[in-house]
Every structure is written in structure tokens, then in C-alpha cells.
Image: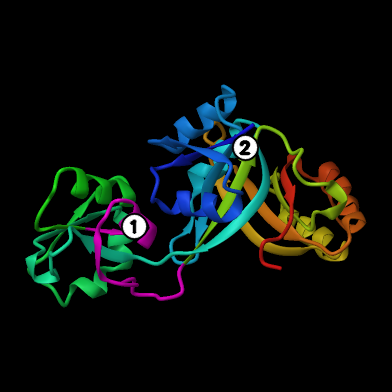
């Protein structure tokens, strides 16, 4: 039976590229316009899994996606780090001198801004999805219009790459989470990374105390992100990632943290993709 994987965007997007790297070939990719619709497809049972971007090494955390995982009681079962390479592409036989507009996602345009200083005649236009722009250029035969997208998109939609790796910062990674309704993928004892969420009272040293528990139990804090609680002004939830060598150390830490923090929750236990 084929696995069905929901992605935000279409085939040729960076989410699609993660699917190709992370899963075997016997899968069905379900294209969704938004992360919310991807989550809906999972909750309704029409897909098995979501691939969801969580943070970028340049732009930082994608905070609404943390909230989606938390609010819908979803579980992170894996992660993948993708090297993001932005490429300029257009219809075959077009040159960069023919291009008058470049359409792409605002983040892609921002990350490639320095490159376009050398081409002042080109207007930068924001769009919803990198791969979708590439697809539209092909389908509508748009001369004079270029896209910023992956090489995979260029191959899928028959476009010519005019310039490779045009992002200003050459090392640009995005961390993607593999998300399911429940965590039955990873044997608990073989996991060495976890994503946790908790809330704390406004008391002096409350966060420091929690961090000391992690340190005393030999957990390595690799990520901490605060998110405002909408219903309680000026109160925050904390999302943290920790790595560990011994699952017993992690179990000890979480048992203590459950007693010390409010609304403690394990968002996922999985294998560290950095190892």
C-alpha cells in the first residue's frame, strides 16, 4: 500500500525534494496550498504524513508551524535538513538579458537580493510558491519572466537554469519535520532527540531551573523558542529540542520537568538527523 505524504506547495518545491530524499519511491505526494490544509488532510485521514518546514538557518523559526503541531496534538517522528540552493530559471532559449521580471516566494527573493543588484532592469515580484511560478511559466509560455526555484523544479517543468546558487549566503539550510498523528514510527529506546513544549510561571529563575534539570540529566539543548499564549497576554510557551545519548537520562529529565512546568508535552521523539 502506498504512503501518502502531504506537502505545502507542489511537486518541484523544496518540501517535495525532502520527500524524495527521506522516503522510498513507493509514495503518493498530496499537494496542499497551505500548511493548514496539509494538517487537515492528516487529521481527516486522507494522508499518512506531513513534511513541514520548521526553521531556516538564515530566517529562523517558522513559528506558526510549531503552533499547528501543538494545537492539533500531532507528533514529530523524524527530521531532515535540506541544503537550499536557489536557481534562476526561464523558458528554453531565454537569456538573463531577456528577463524583465522574476517571480518567487518573498523569502527566496530576499535571500537572492544581492544577486539582482547586478541586473537593475529586472523587477522582483512576490509569489506564493517557488515551484508554482516555474510551473506557470511553462504552462503559460511566459517569455521575459523567470523563477527562483530548485533544480528539481527546472527539470520537472522543462525550464533552463540561467544562474545557479544565486542566494547571498551560500550555506542555507532548512530543517523539516516529518509529522504524523501519533508516534509509532520510532522505537523509543533508539531515539536520541526530542521536541518538548512547556509553560512557566512568571517567577524569577523558573526557566533557569528547567535548563539546569536538562543539564544535570545530560541533555543537550539544541533549540529554544518562545511563543506567546494568545489567551493569556504576556505569558509564553517554550518549545525546545534536546539531544541525548542515553534514553534513561531523557526519561529522568522529562519526569522532573513534568512536575516543575505547566502543560508539559512531548511533541516528538525521533532520531537526530545531524548524526
Residue placed furthest toward the top: 44
- Residue drawn at (92%, 55%), measured in percent from left and top? 248
- Residue drawn at (9%, 55%), measured in percent from left and top? 143
Q: Nearer the viewer, residue 37 or 219?
A: 37
Q: Position of residue 88 (x, y in %)?
A: 26, 65
Image quadrant occupied by the C terminus? bottom right
In terms of secondary structure, where does tag 2 sit?
A: helix
Per the rendered image, the range of residues in magenta is 147-172
- Residue drawn at (57%, 47%), measured in percent from left and top? 25
Residue contact at pointers 1 and 2, CB within 8 angstroms: no
Q: Position of residue 173 (x, y in %)?
A: 49, 65
Instruction: Locate residue 30 relative to residue 139 in the image: left or right.
Output: right
- Disc 1 marks which residue? 155
Q: Position of residue 91 (x, y in %)?
A: 17, 58
Instruction: Locate residue 226 relative to residue 89 in the image: left or right.
Output: right
Q: Nearer the viewer, residue 105 or 4?
A: 4
- Disc 2 marks which residue? 70
Crowd around label 1: few <14 · some 14–19 · many ≥20 (10 Å): few
Amino acid at each position: 500500500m502506498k504512503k501518502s505524504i502531504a506537502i505545502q506547495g507542489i511537486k518541484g518545491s523544496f518540501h517535495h525534494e525532502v520527500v524524495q530524499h527521506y522516503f522510498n519511491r513507493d509514495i503518493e505526494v498530496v499537494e496542499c496550498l497551505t500548511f493548514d490544509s496539509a494538517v487537515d488532510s492528516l487529521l481527516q485521514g486522507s494522508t499518512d504524513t506531513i513534511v513541514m518546514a520548521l526553521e531556516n538557518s538564515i530566517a529562523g523559526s517558522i513559528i506558526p508551524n510549531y503552533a499547528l503541531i501543538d494545537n492539533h496534538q500531532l507528533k514529530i517522528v523524524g527530521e531532515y535538513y535540506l541544503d537550499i540552493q536557489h536557481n534562476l530559471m526561464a523558458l528554453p532559449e531565454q537569456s538573463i538579458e531577456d528577463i524583465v521580471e522574476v517571480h518567487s516566494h518573498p523569502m527566496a527573493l530576499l535571500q537572492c537580493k544581492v544577486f539582482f543588484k547586478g541586473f537593475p532592469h529586472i523587477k522582483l515580484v512576490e509569489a506564493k510558491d517557488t515551484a508554482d511560478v516555474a510551473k506557470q511559466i511553462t504552462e503559460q509560455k511566459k517569455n521575459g519572466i523567470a523563477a527562483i526555484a530548485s533544480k528539481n523544479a527546472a527539470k520537472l517543468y522543462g525550464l533552463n537554469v540561467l544562474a545557479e546558487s544565486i542566494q547571498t549566503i551560500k550555506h542555507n539550510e532548512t530543517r523539516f519535520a516529518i509529522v504524523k498523528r501519533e508516534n509509532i514510527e520510532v522505537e523509543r529506546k533508539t531515539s536520541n532527540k526530542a521536541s518538548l513544549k512547556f509553560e512557566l510561571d512568571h517567577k524569577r529563575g523558573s526557566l533557569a531551573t528547567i535548563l539546569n534539570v536538562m543539564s544535570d540529566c545530560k541533555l543537550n539543548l539544541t533549540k529554544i523558542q518562545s511563543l506567546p499564549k494568545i489567551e493569556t497576554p504576556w505569558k509564553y510557551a517554550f518549545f525546545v529540542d534536546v539531544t541525548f545519548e542515553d534514553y534513561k537520562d531523557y526519561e529522568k529529565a522529562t519526569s522532573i520537568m513534568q512536575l516543575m512546568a505547566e502543560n508539559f508535552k512531548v511533541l516528538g521523539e525521533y532520531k537526530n538527523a545531524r548524526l
